């Protein structure tokens, strides 16, 4: 009898160890499709992350396909229509929650969120990953706050550096107006409100919303409110400000190039990836060697609210319970385990939580001066409103509206037309 009990205990221990290591009775193969989120678009980096996961979970094999933003959505939609969607996908809530999740294509991941997760993951991130009914279609890994940038040498040359808080990376609307005035005396192209398409449009939205504390949507993310008195005032300011030019020929990426070339004194489309760029000079320098300082957008009260990017994982419901369970194991390994630090660093962005499974994530960029300095902007992350229905139509309507304002159209009329178009899409 004692031998029998001992055998049972041993078998129980083996079973428990096998389950904790992720060993499945039968091998399970799953597919991950990922957009180019920092190093998650680099096969060499991702291969290392996958190898670590498979070593810990020998019953699961993961294959990866890399998507481009230019045609990634089309590929995913075609796969969905053909009943060939990937098991896992990595992107943001605007796609996973507000699009494919809202259409019923994705698995509810609410069971992955335990009380510890809810205490560790930032509230603004949590809110973006759940819908109104309490279903979660994204488990988040990393985030960033989009911002703007200034050419510090140009600012110093005209005395405008005194108008910015270079430590906190903040300034007020009045200081912005004064700085543009000083810079415009030397350069007629201080800044560009780019509106040739939707690329980088988070920058123009944040600029306009911050200048006089306007909003882009209502708090419940059900309708667009960009036609507020505050936003109209902001657009009228920009349209009349010498040195700030509405440019329908460029998008955010073009603006960044013009800024790096020294043609513009500031850029409204900026993030940590741009700050780290070393294509034409060392990180944090323009092509000519001027110092680039990342800045929050100017606001009337000095307290900015920055648009953010949130990225994580979702699971398509392909009707295979074993694959769904394996995909959940993958998510928890990458986003809530001691391996999370490497998964976050691969993105070149910031963790959505201070710790994962007891592992401290607050120090993963210690020793990296650029990342540490940029971290100062993260507390300014504002409402993640990109989950409003009709988002794709609203983005197109937004740059069309900016083009109208730039060509001299009445601001109130143009913004009202934007909201009519966007809210009609949201109501569908």
Image (cartoon, rainbow, N blue to C red):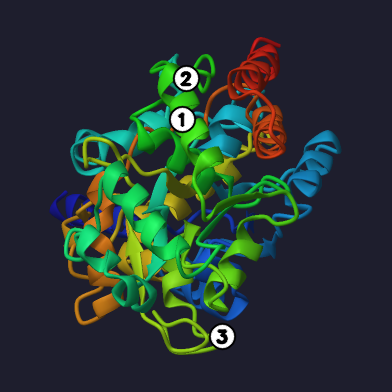
Residue 408: x and y in percent read 69, 33
Q: Is residue 379 visible?
A: yes
Q: Are marks 1 and 2 in contact (CB under 8 Å)?
A: yes
Q: Residue at x 49, y 67 (%)?
A: 58
Q: Nearer the viewer, mark 2 or mark 3?
A: 3
Q: Quadrant of residue 55?
A: bottom left
Asked which secondary structure carries label 2, the reply is: loop
In primary-sequence order, the first of circles 2 and 3 is: 2
Please tell me whether residue 220 is drawn above or below residue 379 in the rendered image: above
The CA distance from mark 2 to mark 3 is 38 Å
Q: Which residue is mark 3?
A: 279
Q: Nearer the viewer, residue 354 or 333?
A: 354
Q: Is residue 91 above or below residue 156?
A: above
Q: Earlier in the sequence, mark 1 or mark 2?
A: 2
Horizontal relation, residue 350 to residue 88: left or right: left
Seen from the viewer's position, the closer of residues 191 and 88 is 191
Q: Furthest residue to the front?
A: 185
Instruction: Tell me residue 94's x, y (percent).
Output: 56, 36
Q: Earlier in the sequence, mark 3 or mark 1?
A: 3
Q: Name which residue lies at 59% across and 59% down.
A: 27
> Which percent across, then down, holds residue 406?
66, 40
Q: Bin the neighbour count of mark 1 within 10 Å (Cα to Cα): few under 14, some 14-19, many 20 and up.
A: many
10 Å neighbourhood of mark 2: few (<14), some, or many (≥20)?
some
Where does label 1 land, which residue? 385
Q: How packed is label 3: few (under 14 Cα within 10 Å), some, or many (20 or more)?
A: few
Which mark, residue 117?
Answer: none
Can residue 92 be spotted in the picture? no
In this rendering, would 325 be left or right of 362? right
Q: In the image, what residue occupies the spot 47% across and 81% down?
A: 286
Residue marked by disc 2: 221
Describe the element under mark 3 as helix, strand or loop: loop
């Amino acid at each position: 009898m004692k031998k029998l009990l001992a055998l049972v205990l041993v078998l129980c221990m083996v079973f428990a160890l096998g389950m904790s290591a992720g060993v499945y009775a039968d091998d399970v193969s799953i597919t991950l499709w990922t957009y180019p989120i920092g190093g998650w678009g680099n096969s060499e980096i991702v291969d290392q992350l996958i190898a670590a996961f498979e070593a810990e979970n020998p019953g699961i094999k993961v294959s990866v396909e890399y998507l481009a933003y230019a045609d990634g959505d089309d590929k995913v939609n075609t796969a969905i229509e053909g009943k060939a969607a990937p098991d896992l996908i990595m992107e943001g809530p605007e796609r996973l929650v507000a699009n494919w999740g809202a259409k019923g294509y994705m698995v509810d991941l609410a069971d992955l969120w335990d009380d510890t997760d809810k205490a560790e993951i930032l509230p603004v991130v949590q809110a973006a990953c759940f819908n109104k009914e309490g279903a979660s279609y994204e488990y988040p890994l990393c985030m960033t706050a989009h911002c703007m940038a200034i050419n510090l040498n140009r600012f110093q040359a005209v005395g405008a550096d005194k108008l910015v808080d270079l430590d906190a990376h903040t300034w007020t609307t009045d200081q912005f107006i004064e700085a543009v005035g000083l810079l415009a005396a030397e350069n007629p192209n201080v800044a560009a409100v780019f509106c040739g398409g939707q690329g980088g449009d988070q920058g123009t939205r944040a600029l306009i919303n911050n200048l006089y504390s306007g909003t882009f949507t209502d708090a419940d993310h059900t309708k667009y409110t960009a036609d507020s008195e505050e936003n109209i005032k902001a657009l009228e300011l920009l349209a009349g400000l010498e040195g700030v030019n509405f440019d329908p020929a460029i998008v955010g990426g073009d603006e960044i190039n013009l800024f790096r070339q020294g043609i513009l004194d500031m850029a409204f489309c900026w993030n940590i990836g741009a700050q780290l760029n070393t294509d034409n000079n060392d990180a944090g320098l323009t092509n000519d060697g001027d110092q680039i300082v990342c800045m929050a957008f100017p606001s009337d009260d000095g307290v900015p609210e920055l648009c953010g990017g949130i990225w994580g994982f979702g699971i398509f419901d392909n009707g295979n319970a074993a694959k769904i369970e394996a995909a959940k194991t993958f998510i928890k390994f990458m986003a809530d385990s001691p391996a999370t630090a490497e998964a976050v660093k691969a993105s070149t962005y910031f963790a959505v939580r201070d710790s994962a499974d007891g592992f401290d994530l607050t120090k993963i960029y210690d020793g990296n001066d650029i990342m540490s300095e940029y971290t100062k902007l993260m507390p300014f992350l504002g409402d993640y409103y990109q989950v409003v229905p009709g988002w794709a139509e609203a983005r197109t309507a937004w740059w069309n509206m900016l083009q109208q304002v730039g060509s001299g159209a009445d601001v109130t009329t143009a913004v009202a037309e934007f909201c009519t178009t966007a809210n009609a899409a949201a109501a569908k």
